[in-house]
Image (cartoon, rainbow, N blue to C red):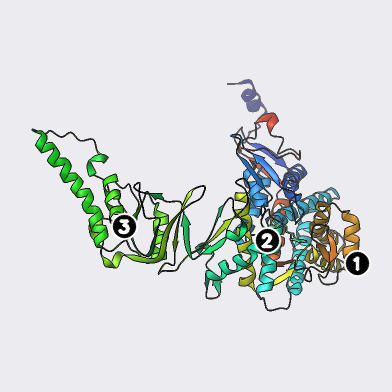
Amino acid sequence: MSGSEQQRQRTGAQPLFVLSEDTERTKGEDAQTANSQAGRAVAESVRTTLGPNGMDKMLVSDSGDVVVTNDGKTILEEMDIEHPAAEMLVEVAENQAEEVGDGTTTAVALAGKLLDETESLLMDDIHPTTIIQGYREALSQAQQTIESLTLDVELDDDHLRQVAQTSMTSGGVGGLTPEALAGLIIDAVRAVRRGDGIGRDALAVKAQPGRVASASRLVDGIVREFDVAGIEHPGEVTDASIAIIDTDLESPETDIDADYQFDSTDQFSAAVQAEEQRLREYAETIANAGADAVFVTGDIADTTAGALSGDGVVSFENVDTSAANDIAALTGAETVARVEELDGDAIGTADSVAIEEYDEQLTFIEGGAGGSAATLFVRGGTEHALDELERSVESGIDTVAAAIESEAVIPGGGAAEIAVAKAVRETASSFEGREQLAIEAFADAVESIPRTLARNAGTDPIDALVELRAANTEGTAGLIGSKADIADPVERGVIDPVSVKSEAITSAAETATMISRIDDVISASWPGRHSGSTHPLPCCDAEVLILE
Ligand code: ADP
Ligand code: MG
């Protein structure tokens, strides 16, 4: 019996171990402070990227991979964030991206600022419950104000173009002008319109470096990197009949280790010939079924590929299942499990299947009978800027889709936030003392968006706020363009979809509320908790830029 047990027995005290020894526990104000600070640190890391004058971040991984981006969600995903409260903010960005496709930086910056306000309120001895109630009132007022700021217009092409441009001027689009892309984006979204909704999943973006932006085009179908089988192939097949086969077109022997005993060379060459014959028959069956382009999920033997191209059939091997499904939906082809099952019914059609050489070899399948997909093929920019260009176009597409679906837009450039903050501040006076402070704090947090737009443009945020408050009635003044001019965003064509704004404010408020409600952090062992000097979180340092 150990000394301490003897002592406990003597004193009669019964120790009660509920948690394992490894468990770390932070309670009360310490927990709240640490969580707020972690959240704030995350928000701080994306703040400088907000708006048309936002800076890019260069994120370098352990293996030296470089990502240059100013997209909030991408930055947070690339960062190796381990603090649980900080992770909740990353989820805000992910959720925002998933729900509306844009406004990720706004949502995270806002959540971080709210946590900052929460911390000050806690220090002033305001109870978390009062803070949460205040935030709830403020959020409801904010939502009402956003509704009321909705522009009373029927959305036409000009509006949609402005929505796309507003979304893209803030992202990097390489050397491309957002104007050039906006028209294409609108056409692309229209191409996948399904009744009242948008078939967003049917619309892909594929960017290729070089050439001028005017070479960008909307492809009525899909663009992929496929392995072309065989050495020779017709570069393009028009009025294509398409077959999809879900198997290997190889000799079965190549898959297994088999020993063959031959009594004579005649017997051997007969066997080889039989095999060759079989491989050629695959090609014959495919050609007889009327196909002139065939997509095979497995390998295609050289003999078969050669015979196919001899018959004028272009063949693709190692096509993954999801691509095969896309081709089936696009062309109306039916995937068969064996070559022998191929008949007229299984054959789909497309206007053309074309193989084009870029930095990579791309296959364009256009004008499919099923007509289920479109691809925005974007040229321009350099290799490094390509991913960012794709992200930016994707976000332009999402924003236009959100505007069409919700049929509602709102003034951008921080004008909406100024109006929301004003309305929220006005309601504050009708509430009891302490709750009032929380409501005002919420208004301050919302105003951090125009404040940040001003700071990122290099103008004085306090002067800008004062001027904006004076000039702004109902969202009529925002900070526009590269010089952050105080102007009417609608006149200058800076508009955002309502859903982007309301989702950002709502999810920021909900997450900040959730984090503020936590007063006890019981952590088993999250990775990195004991990793020492390289990881200053969870306790209070604002440095979270640690990459994988
Ligand atoms: P988020 O990830 O939140 O979308 P962005 O960096 O895209 O962050 O910035 C979006 C904000 O920038 C919105 O408030 C939008 O209204 C504003 N904005 C976009 N273009 C302009 C512009 N030309 N002038 C002023 N503000 C703009
Ligand atoms: Mg944006």
**Quadrant of the picture in which ligand 1 is shown:** bottom right
The residue lying at 28 percent from left, 64 percent from top is: 290
Q: Is residue 503 visible?
A: no
Please tell me whether mark 3 sits on a helix, a strand or a loop. Answer: loop
Q: Position of residue 384 (x, y in %)?
A: 62, 45
Q: Position of residue 10 (x, y in %)?
A: 65, 26
Q: Is residue 242 left or right of residue 266?
A: right
The residue lying at 23 percent from left, 44 percent from top is: 252
Per the image, the residue denoted by label 1 is 470
| Quadrant of residue 524 within the rendered picture | top right
Q: Position of residue 185 (x, y in %)?
A: 60, 65
Per the image, the residue denoted by label 3 is 312
Please tell me whether mark 2 sits on a helix, a strand or a loop. Answer: helix
Which residue is nearer to you in this view: 190 or 209?
A: 209
Per the image, the residue denoted by label 2 is 178
Q: Separation of disc 3 and disc 2 at Cα?
A: 42 Å
Please tell me whether mark 1 sits on a helix, a strand or a loop. Answer: helix
In the picture shown, does residue 216 fall above or below 125?
Answer: below
Which residue is nearer to you in this view: 226 or 255?
A: 226
Disc 2 packing (10 Å; few <14; some 14–19; many ≥20): many
Closer to the chain start, of discs 1 and 2, is 2
Q: Separation of disc 3 and disc 1 at Cα?
A: 72 Å
